[in-house]
Image: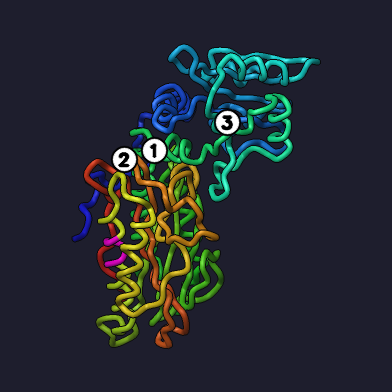
Amino acid sequence: MTPPPSPRPPGDASADAALLDPNRVRLRRITEVLPAKMKQYGIDAWLTFTREGATDALGWDVAADRVVGRAACLFGFLGGRLARVAICASYDVTPFIESGLYEQVVPYKREGIGPHLKEWLDKLDPRKVAINFSRDAPNIDGITLGMYRYLLEVAGAGFEEKLVSAEALMMSVKGVKLPEEVAAIEQAAVATQRILREALSLERITPGRTTELDVGRYLEQRTNELGFKVSFISVVVGPDRGHADPTDRVIAHGDLLRTDFGVFHQGYSSDIQRTAYLLRPGERQPPDAVRRMWDTTLRANRAAIAAMKPGVQAVKVDAAARQVIVEAGYDEYPHAAGHAIGIKVHDTGPVLGPDWKERYGTLVRHGLEEGQVFAVEPMIYHDLPEVGGVVQVGLEEDVVIERSGARVLGTPQTELWLLE
């Protein structure tokens, strides 16, 4: 069954009167979301320990993205409530104070950060401390080896046994979007769909003359006209080139044209793929092999979306899509069926992928949560002599996890777009 489209009409950025304040979102995430999630995961303290030159991947989230000296951003339970403390060089205090994230900002000078950090760790006396390292999640793998060793030096004997990865905690804290974040992503998705529908049409494409670059330029121009910013642009005609930039290849009758494209709205990105086929003279429908690829890709996409519910492991979403493709006689696609989106195109969150330990590790074992937003893109790669080699049919939808399941943001593509 095709997921119901979003009721939001296509708009432009100028229609949004209420601008999303990223600092307010950050403050709400720390003060409202973090304490409950720490209790849920049994974490007594969360520490981001960073410095200039190798800023932690989560630096902005704790207002430490512009520090010079060593800085410790410490959140821990004290007397039943969450204490929020930043310890930093005396010249780094202003961003921490202005962020509003901290109850106390402790400056250091000649004595360095060590004695202050040790004092606070002793005061909190946590049994389990989450720090930002992860084998598999780049957006959470922040602490450097040098800072880790210095932390152990400062904290003293026995502290290393208390340390755990912040991966699961941050997957939930950062992966679950606030309502205003979901709204921003949805507006970006709606705009992306509108721009792609306009671009992949005979009003914009003249077979034999228009190039991939022309399509890419139109996507960028139209994005700017509507008041958005380009996140990324990939335009591929004919044989698959993966995440390829547009080239001067001319678009001709009989080509499959695939676009992978996203725009930023209020700092949040969409990620959507659409595919069109340019009918040859005399054709009323694409070749049977192309039609079958499209139909199977559509069924796989919808199977993945149907499997997406709170509590479902990410690996099971990929399995639902992969089964459709394999049972139709195609090879497995060599990547995940989807990923989280947000401030980054590949944002913090579970990966909707297969159980390939060396590729995805623990990222596919996390359960989905209400409020997470994903791009869903199971693919078929298949050799089609009719269109010149191994091709890929692109279909990617952005969805938000709600209590009853996944809701597609905007209007999903339900048919292969035909240009004649």
Secondary structure of the residue carrying tag 2 is loop
Q: Amino acid at mark 1?
A: Val
**Main SS of residues in magenta:** helix
Give the position of the N terminus as an image quadrant: bottom left
Alpha carbon distance from label 1 to label 3: 26 Å
Q: Which quadrant would residue 393 be assigned to in this image?
A: bottom left
Instruction: Say which residue appears at 20% left-offset and 52% top-offset.
Output: 4
The percent position of residue 91, horizontal first and vertical second, equals 72, 18
Q: Nearer the viewer, residue 289 or 83?
A: 83
Q: Which residue is mark 2?
A: 370
- Any mark on residue 398, and which? none
Q: Which residue is mark 3?
A: 162
The percent position of residue 340, horizontal first and vertical second, equals 43, 48
Number of other residues with Cα within 10 Å of mark 3, as a class: few under 14, some 14 to 19, many 20 or more? few
Give left or right: position of 274 versus 50: left
Which of marks 2 and 3 precedes in the sequence? 3
Q: Amino acid at mark 3?
A: Lys
